[in-house]
Image: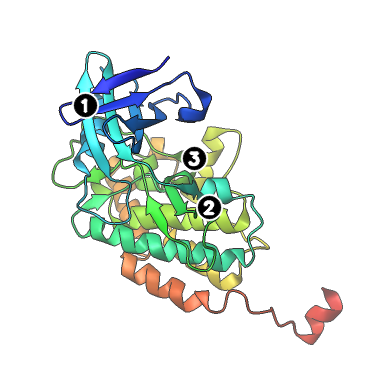
Amino acid sequence: MSYILKTDRAAYLLDPDREDLVLKKKGKFSSVYLGYRVDDRVPVVIKKLNNPEDIQTQFRFQKEALLGFDYYGVQHTLDAWRDESGYYIIKEFIDGLSLRQMMQSAIKERPEFIVKCMVAILDILQQFHLKGIYHCDIRPDNILVLVNKRGNPDILNPQVRLIDFGLSKHSETDFHSYRMPFSMIYSPPEQLLNYPDLVNATTDLYSLALTLYECVAQYPPFFNENPEMVMHLQLNTPVAEHKNISPELLDLIRKATFKKQLRLPPAQLDADEIEKTIAEGQALRYQSCDELKIALEEIKARLNEPVKKNFLSKLFG
């Protein structure tokens, strides 16, 4: 059943019961719909946050509502509203496909395409990092590749957008009294173990490198049906080799996702030792978007070169 959402700025039409207008069905934190601004019929994305009484929901609302038109390469917030029915964030509609949606598509020269997307995302991230804002939820679902009128992306020169800043950390305004959610298979130790004071640029670069790995390999680097095992893998093991990932690109990913192994399980260590170990690992990652971008640009030109095998490798495979 359709209804009108009225804010101080405009009125928006949405219909949660129409499947064609549901962009993302009800999840743990929000439901996302395609709606229209009544005055001019411009399509918009309407995110309704669940659990309005929850403090984390209030934090997400504040963070997403703050991000308007001040940054390029992101899904801009057009409006924000809260009333007795809940919290609403109205965003611009972006005609694009997420890297998750493109994961199983046949893409010629996939590694080069994905690296181009990562380089573009680094340009977007840099402007936030310079202002002390860290996304903290980078994954294939939150990177969109724009498409043309036929619904096809430009593989040679992809245009990307970064979305969903609901978990972002704002260094000057955040409160650390509440544990914020995180994406298990993309988050570094400082997020997994809840050390928000250690979140910095390397945190986003860690998640971006895991996204790069998954989009090229078409399989996540750390995955297990048991969440405790995923946690163990994230804290203690480097990403594995994969046939789709060149050794040079793998070395880059391993540096971006470096973590120093804890001496014992976290429950058996005091907070100071855990914090020191995490910080030592962070120091050995790429430290800035520019640093990682330069490394990716250097590799990009060589990604599609044929692998030259020596005589022994030809004989023994």
* Amino acid at dot 3: Met
- Residue depicted at x 21% and y 49%: 69
Q: How crowded is mark 2: few (under 14 residues within 10 Å), some or many (20 or more)?
A: few
Q: How crowded is mark 1: few (under 14 residues within 10 Å), some or many (20 or more)?
A: some
Q: Which residue lies under the disc numbered 1?
A: 81
In the rendered image, which quarter is residue 176 located in?
top left
- Amino acid beneath label 1: Trp
Residue 22, placed above or below residue 252: above
Note whether 234 is above or below 240 in the view shown.
above
Q: Are the residues at dot 1 and dot 2 in contact (C-beta closer than 8 Å)?
A: no
The residue lying toward the viewer, choosing from 24 and 180, is: 24
- The total number of labels drawn is 3
Q: Where is residue 104 in the image (x, y as percent from the top left)?
A: 64, 49
Q: Which amino acid does label 2 sit on?
A: Thr
If you read the primary sequence from the N terminus, does the residue marked by circle 1 or circle 2 appear first?
A: 1
x and y percentages locating residue 311 in the rendered image: 80, 86
Name which quarter of the figure residue 42 lies in. top left
Q: Residues within 10 Å of mark 3 (few under 14, many from 20)?
A: many
Disc on res. 237? 2
Q: Residue 231 carries which label?
A: 3
Q: Which residue is drawn at 45% across and 71% down?
A: 296
Q: For numbered disc 1, what is the local secondary structure? A: strand
Q: Can residue 275 be seen in this view?
A: yes
* Quadrant of the frame with the N terminus: top left
> Which mark is drawn over residue 303?
none
Can you say which quadrant of the picture contains the C terminus?
bottom right
User: Which tag is nearer the camera, tag 1 or tag 2?
Assistant: 1
Check whether the beta carbons of the residues at disc 2 and disc 3 lie within 8 A of each other: no
Which is more toward the observer, 228 or 82? 82
Q: From the top left corner, tell me how far across and down residue 9 is, in percent.
A: 17, 31
